[in-house]
Image (tube, rainbow, N blue to C red):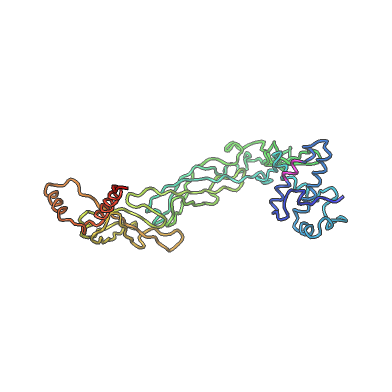
């Protein structure tokens, strides 16, 4: 009786990736596993076919031979075993049963019971000037540190942790299910492999205590809002002598009374008088470095016009480049006029022409044409 194509058995195409093959195999294996289909001979045979197909297709060399010669490549004992179970079948299925039964092997802990400390986050607000110049900031953080009384072991001075009697110090216990042997985290020691009979009174057996620490944080030039700074090993202390976690500093920039930042560029709005905008002039604007720059306003400048000051922006992080500063003028309309000022403006209005106000003259001319077209008989 001819065998079914291995690719068809696993419901994949011949161009399927290794991850696609593994994913399909996991689904089919869970569906047809004998423990899920007790007494079902057809399910048992189906399970063996799936396992045999996966044993070949998961191996690059075996798969290449199968693609070239088909099932003949594994005749006379050269391929998968007669029942479809290869030498590493148990290791392959361990991943599946960890997902089904939640029996992870305690991989997050070392055999000595040490655990890495948690990472910490610290939010810091800085000014735009701090981001421009860079600075060294001192921060105070409460965190867990290694207990000095027990040197992080968790056991009272003069005593030591003992190997767990339930798991023999391995941190895992074996569990037999059908013809499989699975491992799960030891419930007695929670995977640490050790138990403390006489805990340290200072840390209650955890090996760490809470303290407030002062740290220096170097803030480089050009940092932006949301920049993250990592301080390795400055996080929470590990459990029972484990390595410490990291500290992450998240920076946020406080709003500035004059400047708005866009990457490395700075923007500011400067009000100018109607007269200055009309006849021209100049004004001084402050820069982020504390200096002052002159901006010349040509005659007839309209509100909203921008002027670029090259190199007056922010430094680029870890670069020698510097951004620019853009100054936008806003023409200010006179308010609280005296009688004489009003008279002069009225006189100016009478002397105005289409040449002195070309934009408003052109706009109202287009509006007039639009209404004329709409009023024509159809």
Q: Seen in the image, is 10 located left or right of residue 279?
A: right
Task: State the image coordinates of residue 69 (x, y, percent, origin top left).
Answer: 81, 59
Provide the residue span drawn in magenta: 26-31
Q: Seen in the image, is 73 located left or right of residue 203?
A: right
Name above or below for residue 57 compared with residue 152.
Answer: below
Task: State the image coordinates of residue 29 (x, y, percent, origin top left).
Answer: 75, 43
Instruction: Return the residue nearer the eye: 85 or 68.
Output: 68
Task: State the image coordinates of residue 165 (x, y, percent, origin top left).
Answer: 73, 38
Instruction: Return the residue nearer the eye: 117 or 82.
Output: 82
Residue drawn where x is 62% and y is 45% of the image: 115
Furthest toward the front, the residue is 378
Is-magenta flag for residue 29? yes
Task: State the image coordinates of residue 68 (x, y, percent, origin top left).
Answer: 79, 60
- Main SS of the magenta part reads helix
Q: How many labels, in total?
A: 0
Answer with the quarter of the image where residue 236 lies.
Answer: top right
Residue drawn where x is 86% and y is 55% of the image: 77
Residue drawn where x is 71% and y is 49% of the image: 22
Q: Seen in the image, is 148 located left or right of residue 136?
A: right
Is-magenta flag for residue 142? no
Instruction: Return the residue nearer the eye: 116 or 169.
Output: 116
Answer with the quarter of the image where residue 30 lies.
Answer: top right
């Amino acid at each position: 009786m001819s065998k079914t194509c291995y690719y068809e058995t696993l419901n994949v195409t011949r161009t399927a990736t290794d991850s696609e093959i593994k994913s399909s195999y996991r689904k089919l294996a869970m569906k047809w596993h004998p423990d899920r289909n007790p007494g079902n001979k057809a399910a048992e045979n189906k399970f063996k076919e799936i396992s045999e197909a996966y044993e070949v297709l998961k191996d690059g060399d075996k798969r290449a031979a199968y693609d070239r010669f088909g099932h003949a490549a594994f005749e006379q004992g050269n391929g998968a075993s007669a029942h479809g179970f290869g030498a590493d079948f148990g290791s392959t299925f361990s991943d599946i049963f960890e997902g089904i039964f939640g029996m992870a092997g305690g991989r997050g802990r070392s055999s000595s019971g040490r655990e890495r400390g948690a990472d910490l986050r610290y939010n810091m607000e800085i000014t735009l000037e701090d981001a421009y110049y860079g600075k060294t900031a001192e921060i105070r953080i409460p965190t867990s540190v290694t207990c000095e009384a027990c040197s992080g072991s968790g056991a009272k001075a003069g005593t030591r942790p003992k190997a767990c009697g339930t798991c023999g110090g391995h941190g895992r216990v074996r569990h037999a299910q059908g013809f499989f042997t699975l491992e799960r985290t030891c419930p007695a020691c929670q995977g640490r492999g050790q138990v403390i009979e006489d805990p340290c009174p200072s840390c209650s057996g955890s090996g760490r205590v809470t303290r407030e620490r002062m740290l220096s944080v170097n803030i480089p030039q050009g940092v932006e809002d949301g920049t993250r700074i990592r301080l390795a090993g400055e996080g929470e202390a590990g459990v029972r002598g484990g390595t410490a976690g990291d500290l992450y500093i998240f920076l946020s920039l406080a709003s500035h009374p004059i400047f708005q930042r866009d990457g490395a560029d700075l923007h500011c709005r400067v009000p100018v008088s109607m007269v200055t905008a009309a006849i021209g002039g100049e004004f001084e604007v402050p820069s982020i470095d504390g200096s002052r720059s002159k901006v010349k306003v040509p005659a007839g400048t309209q509100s909203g016009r921008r002027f670029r000051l090259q190199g007056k922006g922010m430094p680029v992080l870890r670069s020698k480049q510097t951004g620019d500063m853009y100054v936008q003028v806003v023409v200010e309309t006179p308010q609280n006029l005296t009688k004489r000022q009003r008279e002069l403006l009225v006189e100016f209005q009478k002397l105005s022409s289409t040449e002195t106000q070309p934009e408003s003259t052109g706009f109202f001319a287009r509006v007039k044409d639009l209404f004329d077209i709409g009023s024509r008989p159809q």
